[in-house]
Amino acid sequence: MVNKFLILFIVMMLVSASCYHENHPQVEIPEHQLSKKQMVDILTDVYLAEGAITYQRMNKTLTEEKSASYFKLIFDEHHITHRILKDNLRYYNATPEEMEKIMEDVLANLSKLQAEVMAMKDPVNDTIPWQINDTLPSQYTPSLLYQEVWSYASLIDSLLFQPVDLDSFVNNDSLFSE
């Protein structure tokens, strides 16, 4: 009798263990999979574009064409489309550890760029001394490169929107003129 219960218990444990699987969402590998290095480069450019767009929006100098042109330039430079980037973001988001490493590298790139920009400031050649207080009230601290923290959620949110039809801008010569 004890042997039957022992055997039944062992069988139940084996069946239970064989049914276990991790609860990770299954995401297809994108048709055009980007390497981690490519994702870092693309996302660095996207963050810079987002910073420029936000800065221009705050200064009321942003046009819809200019906003679309930033992303068109990024897509052209990296030879990708909006769909490829969206699919790869979805793929890498399915593995948070990999996406965290990618975002750490993006942050490192942005920090390096910030250091380069800050090093370019030459106080000897500056015509306006930093000690003088500006008489105009400032509504906004300049872009991403100047200590503004962007959330990862805002990046994903901005990349998953329905894109503007960029084909309409391709033959538009006024797109790149100021």
Image (cartoon, rainbow, N blue to C red):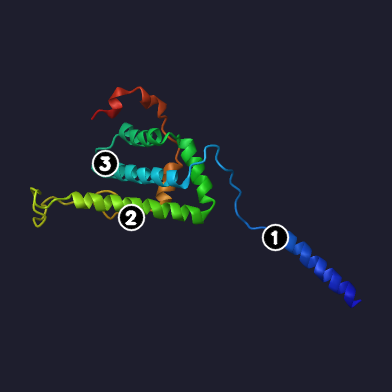
Q: Mark 3 points at which residue?
A: 56
- Labelled pair 3, 1 in contact (Cβ < 8 Å): no
Q: How crowded is mark 1: few (under 14 residues within 10 Å), some or many (20 or more)?
A: few
The residue where tag 2 is placed is 149
In the image, 168 versus 120, the foreground residue is: 120
Residue 119 image position (x, y, % from top left): 20, 52
Residue located 41% across and 33% down the image: 164
- Which mark is drawn over residue 131? none
Placement of the C terminus among the 4 image quadrants? top left
Dot 2, how many residues are within 10 Å of its Cα: few (below 14), some (14-19), or many (20+)? Answer: few
Q: Quadrant of the N terminus?
A: bottom right
Tag 1 residue = 20
Q: Position of residue 43 (x, y in %)?
A: 40, 45
Which is more N-terminal, label 2 or label 1?
1
Whether residue 140 is visible here, answered yes or no, is no
User: Relative to 116, is 158 on the left or the right?
Assistant: right
Residue 105: x and y, percent? Answer: 39, 53
Q: Is residue 165 above or below residue 126?
A: above
- Pair 3/1: label in front: 1
Residue 35, placed above or below residue 148: above
Q: How far apart are marks 2 and 3 (CA)?
A: 17 Å
Alpha carbons under labels 3 and 1: distance apart: 52 Å
Pointer 3: residues within 10 angstroms few (<14), some, or many (20+)?
some
Q: What residue type is labelled 1?
A: Tyr
Q: Going from the N terminus, do you reach mark 2 or mark 3 first?
A: 3
- Horizontally, residue 90 falls left or right of residue 120, namely right
